[in-house]
Structures are given as C-alpha cells and as structure tokens.
Amino acid sequence: MKLSTKHLLGIKDLLKEDIQLILSTATQFKEVLQRPVKKVPSLRDVTIVNLFYENSTRTRMSFELAERRLSADTLNFTASSSSAAKGETLLDTVNNILSMKVDMVVMRHSASGAPHFLAKYIPAAIVNAGDGINEHPTQALLDAFSMQEKLGTLEGVRVAIIGDIMHSRVALSNMYLLRKMGAEVMVVGPPTLIPKYIGEALGVKVTYNLQQALQWCDVANVLRIQLERQNQPLFSSLREYNLAYGIKQKMLDGLGKNIVIMHPGPINRGVEMDSEVADGPNSIILNQVENGVAVRMAVLYLLAGREG
Ligand code: NCD
C-alpha cells in the first residue's frame, strides 16, 4: 500500500486508510528499534533537510533520529543561526537548499500555513512538524499509536483533551485524527481557551468542568498552556489555572477506574499536572516519546514513495 498524499501537511486532509497505513508501518519500525542494530538502509538514497524556524526539543531530535535510523542523509537548519535572520524570505531559503538536491523538507514554523505555502512552490515532499496554532500531524499520529498500543484500539475510545485548546496544534491534529478513527473526544478547559462552535465544527463534546471530563474519559491528553501565543491574559494566573484544571493524583484516585495519562511535552509540572501524575503508573508520556521515532520513520519512509 502507498499513501494517497505526497506531503504530510496535516491530519485534516488524510484518509483513514493513510492513518492506518502509517500506524501499521510504525509497528514494524518499532520492532526494528528493539533490535541490537537499530538501523535499516531504506532511505539510503534520500536527502532530508530539517528546517526549524521555532524552538523544539523532542520533535526535532525525534525526526533526526528517525532519519538516521533509516540511513537518510540529513541537513539541519535553525532559523536563528541562518540568513533568515538577515532578511531572506522563506521561499528563497528553501529554493537555495533545494538547489543542493534535497528530496524532503521537515518544517516547523510559527506561522500557520507556512508548510502549505511551500508545498505549492517546491517539488520536495514536505512534512509539517508544527505550524503555528494550526496542526502538528506527527504528534497526533504518535499519540494515536501510543493509545492504540495501550488500549488495543482507537474505535470507541473516549479521549479528553485538556487545557489550552485554542492555541494548541496538538489538540487540533488529535481531534481530526481521533474522529476519523472512530474515537470519541471531549475538550475541557477555561471557556476563554476553547474556541466557540468547536463542538459542532469538529464533532467533539465540550465541557468547562475537569471532574466531568475525567469521569467520562478513558484517556486524558493534557496540554501545555501556550503563554507565548497569548497576547492578552486569558485566565487570571497559573496558580488559579492549576486549581481549576491541574490534574492531581487525589482526583485520579477518586475516579474508581484507571485512565491513561498523556502529554506531548514540554510539561509544566505543578501547572497542568502534578509530578505524581506525570510520573505515575498510568502515565505513558515517555512511551509517547519512544513511539515518536517509529512513527516518524513510518511517515518519512512512506512519503519517500516506499510501500508499507
Ligand atoms: C508541542 C508543540 O511544540 O506543538 N510540543 C511537541 O511538539 N511535543 C506542544 C507544546 O509546545 O506545548
């Protein structure tokens, strides 16, 4: 099977079959990563540039590792240390890089739609590694992979997405993916951080009550408050946010069931969740990071036109 798309710009435009193909290919790569020699020659003839216009730890390292495990040649570009700081446009930067015969571009940018713009103008395959407040498709894919690994299926699973829904590209990509795959979604957070009409637009439930969401869900995917994207205060203080929406171990103990705890990172301990919760037995936060490499290997492999 092959992907129906040339680029991975978002989950919005993916078919359910594409998502299934990426997840099953990732299972095979996860098996490769358990071997003593964690490397395959699959992309030996492929050159990939990692174009990061915005800070990143996990995502960037994960893509770099995935590329190396596939034996691709890689180039790294960091906006702050490049000619972008001298006023070069995005298209000029990329065209210059492409003259060096690059096949694929992995791109993170603070402007929503930046990878979609590039996809119109350059022949290389583009992977969106996070564009502004729009999408972060590989994060949603690794979240889905991790949920499926833990629970056996996505069909009918109840997922609560908690926190800064408005500014989170992780939330949007997760909502698209989970709805396509037959999971149920409830978003929860302060009213000022949940866009109006999101329920009808995306087929998700909305609540402002954390306890209600925890009682309803099988999985809690907890988000970071994206203070850097809020140009006016949308809640009174981090302390008050924690009082109303922070996940505490006592709450989980009182539910009478186990729920899976997820977070895309970076965590602000003591704000969106306590350390006891982040490091507790129901947390799969570090499994998410581990699975990220296998999922990104699958995405790069399939976008290079290989068959899964
Ligand atoms: C997220 C991001 O950058 O979109 N982190 C990540 O990629 N793992 C979420 C965040 O920054 O809060």
Image (cartoon, rainbow, N blue to C red):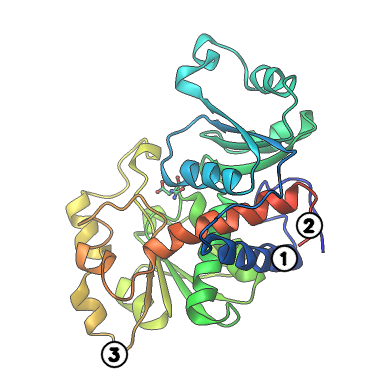
Q: Quadrant of the C terminus?
A: bottom right
The vertical placement of 254 against 122, above or below, is: below
Quick check: can you spot residue 206? Answer: yes
Q: Position of residue 127 (x, y in %)?
A: 65, 43
- Residue pointed to by mark 1: 21
Q: Position of residue 69 (x, y in %)?
A: 58, 49
- The number of numbered discs placed on residues in the rendered structure image is 3
Q: Quadrant of the N terminus?
A: bottom right
Label 2 or label 1, whichever comes before in sequence order: 2
Question: Do the CB atoms of the residues marked 3 and 1 lie less than 8 Å apart?
Answer: no
Mark 1: few/some/many CA within 10 Å (<14, 14-19, 20+): many
Residue depicted at 58% across the width and 69% down the height = 178
Where disc 2 sits, the SS reads loop
- Residue pointed to by mark 3: 256
- Residue pointed to by mark 2: 3
Label 3 or label 1, whichever comes before in sequence order: 1
Where disc 3 sits, the SS reads loop
Mark 2 CB within 8 Å of ligand 1 = no
Residue placed furthest toward the front: 36
Quarter of image, res 214 = bottom left
Q: Position of residue 267 (x, y in %)?
A: 31, 53
Report the amino acid beneath label 2.
Leu
Report the amino acid beneath label 1.
Leu
Residue depicted at 42% across the width and 79% down the height = 217
Mark 3: few/some/many CA within 10 Å (<14, 14-19, 20+): few
- Horizontal side of 166 relative to 76 (left or right) equals left
Where disc 1 sits, the SS reads helix
